[in-house]
Image (tube, rainbow, N blue to C red):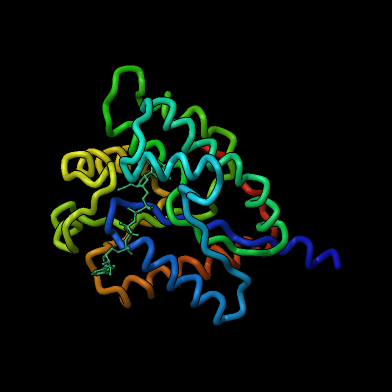
Amino acid sequence: GASQASQRGAFILFEGVDRCGKTTQSRRLVEHLQAVGVDAELWRFPDRTTAIGRMIDAYLSCKAEADDAAMHLLFSANRWEKRAALLAALAAGRTLVVDRYAYSGVAFTAAKRLPGLDLAWCQAPDRGLPAPDAIIYLELSIEDAMARGGFGGERYEREELQREVARQFMAMRDGAWHVLDASQSEGALHTQVRNIAEDVVDRCRAGPRVGTLWA
Ligand code: Z5A
């Protein structure tokens, strides 16, 4: 009926530096939401399964070299190609828990500090994408992140770059972000995440319009 149609899902985004626990927390949150009867699904960006995603995967795993600006646009295109499905899922009442999105896109490219690729340039291609209803930023020092096991072999897993990525995230943060201390135990963090998520799922049931970046 009409009331069903207005019950849209929530778009809950996790962001943070490498190793901050996004994957762990986003999985646990989806399991929790499903257990309490919320239709919820885990998404992650980059989505390495599409044609564009396979190019991104080759780049991240250092199997291919590419121009930094061109790569930035591919990461953004990888979000645009999922836009219709994302909006359709929300409209159908499905809550999406998303591991990285446009904020990572901006932070990682801006962290390279290349001439011309400043913050405004980095933000431009993602302008107009669906905006998350809640941003959960898992804050972890690079020291703590590194203590969780050495970096792997992917392109951006370097200490200096990760430090600059953290600075770029900080520059984008505003009062609406939920900044959580990611050095806490997994369980304590999950409790905080769950409270934030349940609030936003409730709020979205009333059917507010999905926002757009960069609001
Ligand atoms: N990228 C980009 O450049 N442009 C873009 O537009 C987008 C992304 C979207 C994708 O990496 C790369 O692409 C990424 C950004 C760039 N590059 N980097 N770096 P990815 O998403 O495939 O990988 P990741 O996000 O870096 O994931 P990760 O390394 O798996 O980190 P995580 O998901 O945040 O953490 P985790 O796997 O949940 O936990 C890491 C470890 O810590 C693990 O051993 C856990 O057991 C442990 N852990 C988790 N929580 C805790 C707590 N609370 N205490 C102690 N230990 C914990």
In the displayed structure, 7 sits above or below 135; it is: below
Residue 125 in picture, x, y percent from top left:
51, 29
Residue 7 in picture, x, y percent from top left:
71, 64
In the displayed structure, 37 sits above or below 145; it is: below
Which residue shows up at 49% across the image and 76% down it? 31
Q: Is residue 182 left or right of residue 210?
A: left
- Residues 196 and 28: in front is 28
Which residue shows up at 20% across the image and 57% down it? 145
Residue 112 in picture, x, y percent from top left:
27, 30
In the displayed structure, 118 sits above or below 196; it is: above
Quarter containing the N terminus: bottom right
Residue 67 in picture, x, y percent from top left:
37, 25
Q: Is residue 18 left or right of residue 4?
A: left
Q: Residue furthest top?
A: 116
Q: Residue furthest bottom?
A: 35
- Which quadrant of the view contains residue 62? top left
Which residue shows up at 29% across the image and 51% down it? 17
- Which quadrant of the view contains residue 114? top left
Which residue shows up at 36% across the image and 68% down it? 24
Q: Is residue 158 left or right of residue 118?
A: left
Ligand 1 located in image quadrant: bottom left
- Which quadrant of the view contains residue 115? top left
